[in-house]
Amino acid sequence: MIYHSTRQKDGGVNAREALLKGLCDDGGLFVSDEVDTRPLLPADLVRLDYRTIAFEVFSRLLDDFTADELKAGIEAAYGNTFASPAVTPVTRLGDNWLLELYHGPTSAFKDVALCMLPQFMSAALKGKKERVMIVIATSGDTGKAALNGFKDVPGVGITVFYPYEKVSDIQYLQMATQEGKNVNVAAVEGNFDDVQSAVKRLFASDFAKETAANGVKLSSANSINIGRLVPQVVYYFDAYRQLMANGTIKAGDSVDFTVPTGNFGDVLAGYYAKKMGLPVGRFVVASNANNVLTDFLTTGVYDRNRPFIKTITPSMDILISSNLERMLYDMANGDTDLIARLMTDLKEKGVFKVEGEMLDKIRAVFTCGFADDAETRISIRDAWKTDNRLIDPHTAVARKVALEKQREGVPMVVLATASTYKFCKDVYEAIAETERDRHDWDGFRYMDELVKLTGEPAPAALATLRQKPLLHQSVVTVDGMTAVVKNAAQREF
Ligand SMILES: *Cc1c(COP(=O)(O)O)cnc(C)c1O
């Protein structure tokens, strides 16, 4: 299977190389024209479980990994790391279904991919002399999931930067208490955009070239890497299997999915599942007040020239949805020149436009909607009061949009992307009897109060954070980031 850039077909590589490189040299994303060549049929899912579906999906999309490598990797990633034996169980949410993606070690859906990516990377590095230093800018969730996934992986180091005092109390403690001899964490003075821009500059710097010459290649683990995308395809198939098993559908029936969306990685993985044969009717793209995707899917105009709004769903506070480029490539029938043009427009003017047949094609598969913070709080409270379900703000955005878009006779699956207990304060305030009950509590107090209010226990890994020693407390300036990576690269890993 060949992976090439969304912006040109020359220079294709195999999956191993695409995974180690992350991003194409021309700035495009790796795509393959062979995603639909070996379908995985609904009727064949019946006798499988999460891990065997993972094997079927990986061996189709990453066909240059050996069966042994995939099986060992799947065992290490999902064998006993998830708090639910089903890995990603499907449960009821009112008249709809909830796909619970938050039972991983850091209580975010990003665990599903970031438990597996290090396994792929180790296999791809085997027999090579080079080592890899993963460098990540995080607004909160990705950092901890990546630290957990890459800790003590031989030949791979990891350095995480987050904006100083701009992550939640719990997210800070999750990162600051991370153990492992190859992990490095630093807060940076600035906001997330400052940190992310600095990391991008670092990848393109002379320092990156020097380090590579010394045998340590800088790499990224964000959601544009195919090694993050492919593991997410699995749970769409497994959700469908669970709905067959509980008698909701028969093989071949249509199902709709609503996905709380930021970088478009999660919903794109669902689209790849559909291309591989999963009978999905529509994907509902749910956004927060940064509703650039709602506008795009409604009008065909993608316009990032708008104020950036800080919301209670920070993982969806995004104005450039990177993975959209892969969907556009597909909907343009592989017209790389068109994609290169659209992406140049986006870079230079902040706007691009899609129209005619291509827009019709996109809108036949992807529909959309959004919830602002007030609507998100109402959705959290309604889920608790009406559906008896405790959901996090990101999931609440999806729930609200799903209710607008559900169709008679078509089961709707809502993706639940984080544990409520990563966002204790906002959830507590949304469902507390004394409305908008504001206190000056710390993260653990909100956690305790939320447990008291709802009777639902917090995940052990979050509840026990308060007993853990703080191991990473350095704060650096943007200019100091290179030195952090330099020191990290010189350590043993
Ligand atoms: C990352 C994240 C999302 C958005 O997923 P994308 O793949 O970026 O669209 C939604 N919810 C939570 C909790 C997340 O951490």
Image: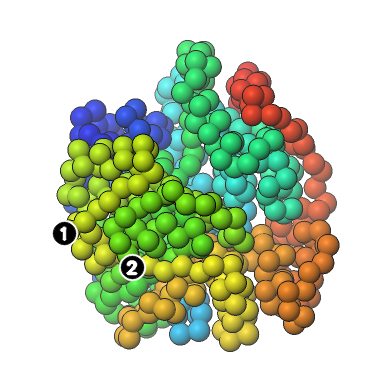
- Name the foreground residue: 64 vs 468: 468
Q: Position of residue 27 (x, y in %)?
A: 35, 33
Query: Along the polypeptide, which appears first: circle 1 or circle 2?
Result: 1
Residue 39 screen position, x and y as percent: 22, 58
Residue 367 — which label?
2
In percent of width and height, residue 59 lies at 31, 48
| Image point (41%, 78%), residue name | 404
- Disc tally is 2
Q: Is residue 391 above or below residue 229?
A: below
Secondary structure at badge 2 equals: strand
Q: Is residue 49 above or below residue 128?
A: below
Q: Quadrant of the C terminus?
A: top right
Q: Residue at x 67, y 74 (%)?
A: 430
> Amino acid type of disc 1?
Glu
Q: CA distance from mark 1 to mark 2?
A: 16 Å
Taking the image as shown, residue 413 lies to the left or right of residue 26, namely right
Do the residues under discs 1 and 2 have CB atoms within 8 angstroms?
Answer: no
Residue 66 at x, y percent in the picture: 34, 40
Q: Quadrant of residue 183?
A: top right
Q: Is mark 2 within 8 Å of ligand 1?
A: no
Report the side of 364 relative to 195 (left or right): left
Under mark 2, the amino acid is Thr
Which residue does the numbered mark 1 point to in the structure image? 357
Looking at the rendering, which quadrant does residue 272 occupy? bottom left
The reply to whether residue 53 is visible in this rendering is: no
Left/right of residue 369 with respect to residue 251 in the rendered view: right
- Say above or below: 370 vs 306: below
